[in-house]
Amino acid sequence: MSGALFDLDRLEANAREVERSQKEVELADRKSHHLQQKILTLQARRNELRTQLPQVTSQPPDLEAATKEGKKLMSALKKLRQLQEIQKLYRLTGVSVQEKTENKLMLRFDTSYNHEYVDEHYIELIRSKKQDGYQVSHHTLPAFIPLSQLEVHLETEIKVFVDTVREYLQAFVIRRGQVKMLETELAEILRSEIETSFPVDYVSMSLQSADDVPIRITLCYTDLRSAHPDKAEVSPIETPVVIDCLRGLEDKAFASVI
């Protein structure tokens, strides 16, 4: 149970860090807007003074103030961009605690592909009545993730449960992204749309090869936590032309034996 509490504390610490970053971003954004308005006001005042004093021998004090405020603005904008990058990186890799009460815990899983955020999924956990741990109450996960098998980890090791769920989600997103990439890169030789199962553990595509013989490539993934196929098959598609060609090869082979 100590391991589960440690994992929970770590998730809460991550959530607090994200919340703190968001508040800093909002504060920097408000400060930046205020400084931008102040610079516009000072610039208008400077232009007014220039019309009244054609020969200006020294820099107006207001302009000096505007320069100082401008430097502060640039510093605030730089910090804003840094915080936005931190948030983006967190969304690409993070699992966070969205809500926590005495008897309920809401987890959020962010997924990404090719360094871009894709979507999020949620799991609501409630205190287990039989064990000193948690059980799944509601979730938005794909149906192929075996939650009933993974729930056993919620009794002692939340980290194992969280890490395993994320592996399933991330591998699913990567497989789906790879199929979309193939559809784009192979568009000129694809004979039809790429066929996939819902978990994208089965992928089949029909291609026109360089010698005009249509082929079918099939990819199979036995481990749904993996983004690499365990089995790949390449076979010719039986069109009338291919069938005639195969029969010709068979006849030649038979004749050589005789």
Image (tube, rainbow, N blue to C red):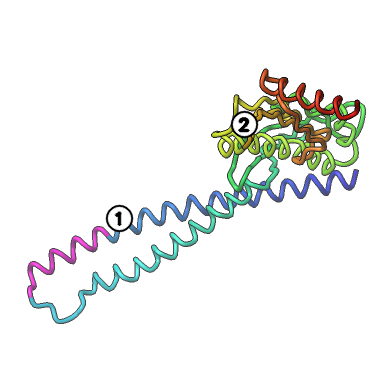
Instruction: Look at the image and give the residue range highlighted in magenta.
Output: 40-54
User: Residue 205 is drawn in which quadrant?
Assistant: top right
Question: Does residue 12 appear to the left or right of 48 in the view shown?
Answer: right
Question: Does residue 246 appear to the left or right of 64 in the view shown?
Answer: right
Q: Residues within 10 Å of mark 2 (few under 14, many from 20)?
A: few
Question: Between residues 81 and 61, which one lies in front from this camera angle?
Answer: 81
Residue at numbered disc 2: 212
Question: Between residues 252 and 145, which one lies in front from this camera angle?
Answer: 252
Q: Is residue 186 magenta?
A: no
Residue drawn at x 58%, y 50% is 87
Residue at numbered disc 1: 37
Q: Residues within 10 Å of mark 1 (few under 14, many from 20)?
A: few
The label on residue 237 is none
Amino acid carrying label 1: it is Gln
Residue drawn at x 87%, y 42% is 157
- Mark-to-mark CA distance, 1 and 2: 66 Å
The N terminus lies in quadrant:
top right
Determine whether the residue tagged by mark 1 lies in a helix, strand or loop.
helix
State the image coordinates of residue 20 (x, y, percent, origin top left).
59, 52
State the image coordinates of residue 115 (x, y, percent, origin top left).
60, 48
Determine whether the residue tagged by mark 2 lies in a helix, strand or loop.
loop
Q: Point out the tag, 1 or 2, that comes first from the N-terminus.
A: 1
Residue at the extreme top of the image, as rendered = 240
